[in-house]
């Protein structure tokens, strides 16, 4: 025990002595840096611990946000059905209100039109731009416009009313229409020199007419020769027309051939018109024809005139055009359209416009039909 104690004490002395000895400079510098290194390690550890804590907090927050987002999305999906229903209800309500407002505006516009226009039909027509509207047989009729047919390119702005009540058609600042009339024995004796001086450039003269009664007798117009000679002698271009009431092929051929024979005395180059009208008398013999039957007879007339070297033309009004004829079958023939209005309503092609039955022309006693060339004949 003593020896161990002595040796231990001796060793401690030696150790103390060794530390007290002079040390090399490098060793001293190393010892001096040891406290700094220890602090750096401590700081680094603290930084790492802080960063770890921060990451943990962020992870917790992020996880918490995800849970909130998921919860929010889940909530939104659950409410989608109700939201859509609410929107649909709002949309339906808005559409219904718009429809009501639209109807009210349309009715107000119609009311104004009815108050300002001279007829109900003129007030109604602007509301149906894709249909032809007319009053027939005690009712309003609506017929879709067939845009496969030849359409005219006339513009309302081109129609000019003169102070004397006559119309003319202007295009690009130039009057391109010509003034015309159509006459029969109803006008009596006509002073054609005065007619020419009044600016009339063409005239259609009735050649033949058929009674609309059951007998349907074919008659020659008693003033035809005088009117043809008088018009031609005064430089007025002439054409002839037939008031048809034919109900068979034999009758329509009879009408066409008689007209051709009468016209041929004066010219071999003019227009011969078949006048297709619905008579006011309900017993009118041609009124009973179907559109197909009437179209077939009209086409036969035109073919007969054409074969004789003359130019065929068809005269009709709006009712005849859209209710009593098949215009597609008659597309190739020129048209003479009657409408006693200042409005260019009829959409299809036509060459002559009869715009009045109460015109006044010098040299003619009483009213006369007024026409203007407005289509191909005016080019």
Image (tube, grey):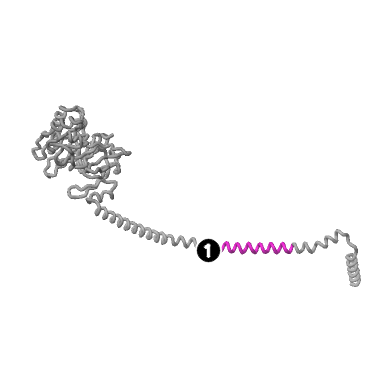
Magenta segment: does it hold 51? yes
Q: Which residue is mark 1?
A: 68
Q: Position of residue 360 (x, y in %)?
A: 18, 41
Q: Which residues are magenta?
A: 41-65
Q: Is residue 68 left or right of residue 13?
A: left
* Residue that sits furthest to the left in the current view: 215
Q: Nearer the viewer, residue 188 or 17?
A: 188
Is residue 322 among the parts visible in the rendering?
A: no
Quarter of the figure with the C terminus: top left
Left or right, 71 with respect to 344, comes to: right
Q: Residues within 10 Å of mark 1 (few under 14, many from 20)?
A: few
Residue 175 vs residue 91: left or right? left
**Image vertical order of residue 123 relative to residue 368, above or below:** below
Residue at x 83% of width, y 60% of height:
30
Q: Tell me where residue 230 sits by quadrant.
A: top left
Residue at the location (12% across, 36% down)?
189
Q: Is 175 on the left-hand or right-hand side of 53?
A: left
Question: x and y percent of residue 140 in the render?
Answer: 21, 49
Give the main secondary structure of the magenta stretch: helix
Residue toward you, 303 or 115: 115
Location of the N terminus by quadrant is bottom right
For the point 20% across and 48% down, the residue is 135
Q: Position of residue 37 (x, y in %)?
A: 77, 62
Q: Residue furthest bottom?
A: 2
Percent coordinates x, y for residue 280 in the rendering: 14, 44
């Amino acid at each position: 025990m003593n020896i161990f104690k002595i040796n231990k004490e001796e060793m401690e002395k030696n150790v103390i002595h060794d530390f007290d000895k002079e040390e090399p400079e490098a060793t001293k510098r190393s010892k001096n840096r040891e406290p700094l290194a220890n602090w750096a390690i401590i700081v680094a550890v603290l930084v790492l611990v802080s960063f770890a804590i921060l990451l943990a907090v962020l992870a917790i927050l992020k996880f918490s946000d995800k849970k909130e987002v998921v919860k929010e999305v889940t909530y939104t999906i659950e409410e989608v059905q109700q939201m859509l229903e609410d929107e649909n209800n709002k949309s339906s309500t808005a559409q219904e209100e718009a429809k009501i407002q639209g109807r009210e505006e349309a009715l107000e516009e119609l009311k104004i039109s009815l108050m300002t226009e001279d007829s109900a039909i003129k007030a109604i027509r602007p509301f149906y731009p894709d249909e032809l509207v007319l009053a027939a047989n005690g009712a309003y009729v609506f017929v879709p416009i067939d845009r496969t047919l030849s359409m005219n390119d006339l513009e309302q702005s081109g129609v000019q009313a003169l102070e004397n009540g006559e119309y003319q058609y202007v295009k690009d600042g130039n009057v391109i229409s010509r003034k015309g009339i159509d006459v029969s024995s109803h006008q009596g004796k006509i002073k054609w020199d005065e007619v020419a001086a009044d600016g009339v450039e063409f005239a259609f003269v009735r050649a033949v007419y058929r009674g609309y009664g059951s007998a349907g007798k074919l008659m020659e117009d008693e003033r035809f020769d005088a009117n043809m000679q008088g018009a031609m002698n005064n430089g007025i271009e002439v054409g002839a027309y037939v008031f048809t009431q034919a109900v068979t092929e034999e009758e329509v051929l009879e009408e066409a051939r008689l007209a051709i024979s009468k016209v041929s005395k004066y010219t071999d180059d003019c227009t011969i018109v078949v006048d297709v009208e619905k008579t006011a008398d309900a017993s009118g013999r041609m009124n009973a024809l179907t559109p197909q039957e009437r179209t077939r007879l009209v086409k036969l007339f035109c073919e007969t005139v054409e074969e004789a070297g003359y130019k065929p033309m068809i005269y009709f009004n709006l009712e005849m055009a859209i209710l009593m004829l098949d215009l597609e079958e008659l597309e190739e023939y020129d048209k003479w359209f009657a409408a006693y209005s200042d409005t260019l309503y009829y959409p299809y092609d036509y060459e002559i416009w009869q715009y009045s039955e109460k015109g006044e022309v010098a040299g003619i006693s009483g009213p006369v039909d007024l026409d203007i060339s407005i289509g191909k004949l005016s080019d």
